[in-house]
Image: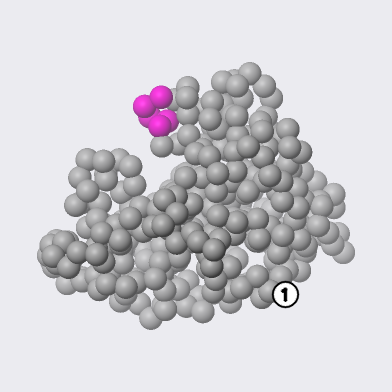
């Protein structure tokens, strides 16, 4: 399956191990990534708050670049991008005049966004396009004894109507389904659907870190081995800031945070080093014995 691939700016900058993991996982899922290397930031938060038209122009430009490829759909690995782009696409598709106005901003590059592009986060693509049965069939190293806490964050589950969460598409349960398909055990805890705190970190760092610390602490108390996130920004606040978050909540933490392609990679037979886990602040390899204790068949 060919997909026009938008990794997002964070996974190519702050967390290149996440982008790199997707590149290694893709062929194991029979995905051919057509990378949109000329695409820009989705504008979530900072740009959109100051100039919505500029943010919409940036996203329309990305959509137009995707429509120039021979990929059947567009895929991202950042749920913040998914949320911002879904909101933008809803505005563009609902208003012909506004879409024309935005396309005028793209005229110098001879780009035009045409209504109707399908844009899916990797999590959605796994369930809706690849399918859980196919995913199970590709698992070579089941995560049999790994207790995984799903962390959805903000942008991929709400507002539900915009993000297509309904009875036919229970996207607010897809992470649970994927963890189980990989052989892992789902750990439910209080923070599953809460904000990681990243959106307010520049305005109120203490509150942001307390949010992150509470979620990680709740997962530890629920006996999770790790958290898995569909968003590089969640990864930043829950992993990079975890030592500071521990101070804010007054307890030891030390819980590994994995991005979704990394969890997939483990189950599909890749090694932690190949997936960039040594670059994490809370290094999964120092907390969990991936060689034997939680990964079935790793020593075979």
**Which secondary structure is most common in the magenta stretch?**
loop
The answer to which image quadrant residue 221 occupies is top right
Provide the residue designation for mark 1.
Answer: 137
At 63% from the left and 48% from the top, the residue drawn is 150
Is 87 positioned to the left or the right of 100 in the image?
Answer: right
Label 1: how many Cα within 10 Å (few below 14, some 14–19, many 20+): few
Q: Nearer the viewer, residue 236 or 186?
A: 186
Q: Position of residue 97 (x, y in %)?
A: 13, 65
Q: Position of residue 175 (x, y in %)?
A: 61, 56
For residue 296, what is the image quadrant? bottom right
Mark 1 residue element:
helix
Looking at the rendering, the stretch of residues picked out in magenta corresponds to 200-204
Q: Residue 152, how many percent across, how many down?
A: 55, 48
Q: Residue furthest front?
A: 167
Q: Is residue 188 magenta?
A: no
Query: Relative to 256, does residue 113 appear above or below in the rendering?
Result: below
**Would residue 67 appear left or right of 124 to someone viewing this image?**
left
Residue that appears at 31% across and 49% down: 43
Q: Is 203 a magenta residue? A: yes
In the image, 156 versus 199, the foreground residue is 156
Above or below: residue 69 compared with residue 263: below
């Amino acid at each position: 399956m060919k997909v026009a691939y938008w990794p997002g700016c964070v996974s190519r900058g702050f967390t290149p191990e996440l982008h790199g993991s997707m590149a290694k996982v893709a062929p194991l899922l029979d995905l051919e990534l057509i990378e949109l290397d000329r695409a820009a930031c989705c504008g979530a938060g900072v740009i959109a708050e100051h100039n919505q038209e500029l943010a919409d122009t940036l996203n329309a430009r990305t959509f137009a670049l995707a429509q120039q490829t021979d990929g059947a759909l567009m895929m991202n690995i950042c749920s913040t991008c998914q949320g911002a782009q879904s909101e933008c696409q809803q505005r563009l598709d609902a208003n012909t005049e506004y879409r024309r106005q935005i396309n005028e901003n793209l005229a110098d590059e001879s780009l035009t966004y045409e209504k109707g592009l399908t844009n899916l986060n990797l999590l959605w693509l796994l369930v809706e396009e690849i399918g859980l049965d196919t995913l199970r069939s590709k698992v070579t190293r089941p995560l049999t004894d790994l207790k995984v806490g799903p962390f959805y964050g903000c942008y991929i589950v709400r507002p539900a109507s915009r993000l297509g969460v309904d009875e036919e598409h229970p996207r607010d349960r897809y992470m649970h389904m994927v963890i189980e398909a990989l052989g892992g055990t789902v750990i439910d805890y209080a923070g599953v659907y809460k904000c990681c705190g990243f959106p307010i970190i520049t305005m109120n760092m203490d509150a942001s870190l307390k949010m992150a610390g509470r979620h990680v602490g709740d997962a530890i108390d629920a006996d999770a081995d790790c958290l898995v996130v569909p968003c590089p920004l969640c990864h930043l606040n829950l992993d990079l800031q975890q030592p500071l978050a521990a101070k804010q909540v007054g307890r030891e933490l030390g819980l590994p945070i994995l991005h979704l392609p990394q969890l997939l990679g483990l189950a599909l037979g890749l090694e932690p080093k190949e997936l960039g886990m040594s670059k994490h602040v809370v290094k999964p390899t120092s907390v969990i014995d991936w060689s034997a204790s939680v990964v079935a068949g790793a020593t075979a």
